[in-house]
Image (tube, grey):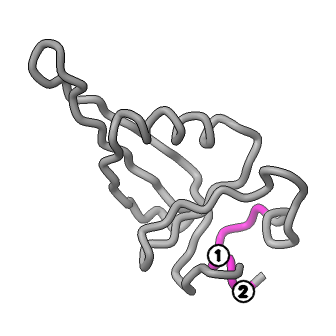
Amino acid sequence: MPGASEQTRRVKTVNANWVPGPDGGHGRFEVMFITDDDQRHMAAPSPESMTALITMIRADTVLAWDPEGRTLIVANIVGTMPWTEHREPGPLLSR
């Protein structure tokens, strides 16, 4: 996959927590991406970023996490790529 490290893996689960802040505050979000090799990766997006993140996660897309660049890759927004058509676990670059 162009621009991704060799550690990039498909995301199989996304969990999020919201920790309330003081009254009137936005609070804090924590997101965990679990990849197909069962590794857990954490991120703490802003409330504004969380809105966009939920939209991308809920879309009919393929998600991949690059731990080296701490990058969430959202594929198949329009069209498909050959590496997104296979669902078996393993590094995405080897496809």
Quarter of the view holding residue 1: bottom right
**Cβ–Cβ below 8 Å for labels 2 and 1?**
yes
Q: Which mark is residue 90?
A: 1
Q: Which mark is residue 94?
A: 2
Total marks placed: 2
Q: Chief secondary structure of the magenta span?
A: loop
Which residues are the magenta region? 87-94
Give the structural element (helix, strand or loop) at label 1.
Answer: loop
Instruction: Assign the C terminus to one quadrant of the image.
Output: bottom right
Q: CA distance from mark 2 to mark 1?
A: 8 Å
Q: Residue at x 23, y 35 (%)?
A: 28
Q: Residue at x 34, y 53 (%)?
A: 43
> Callout 2: 10 Å neighbours few (<14), some, many (20+)?
few
Q: Residue at x 49, y 44 (%)?
A: 14
Which amino acid does the dot numbered 1 rest on?
A: Gly
In the image, 78: left or right of 26? Answer: right
Which amino acid does the dot numbered 2 rest on?
A: Ser
> Callout 1: 10 Å neighbours few (<14), some, many (20+)?
some
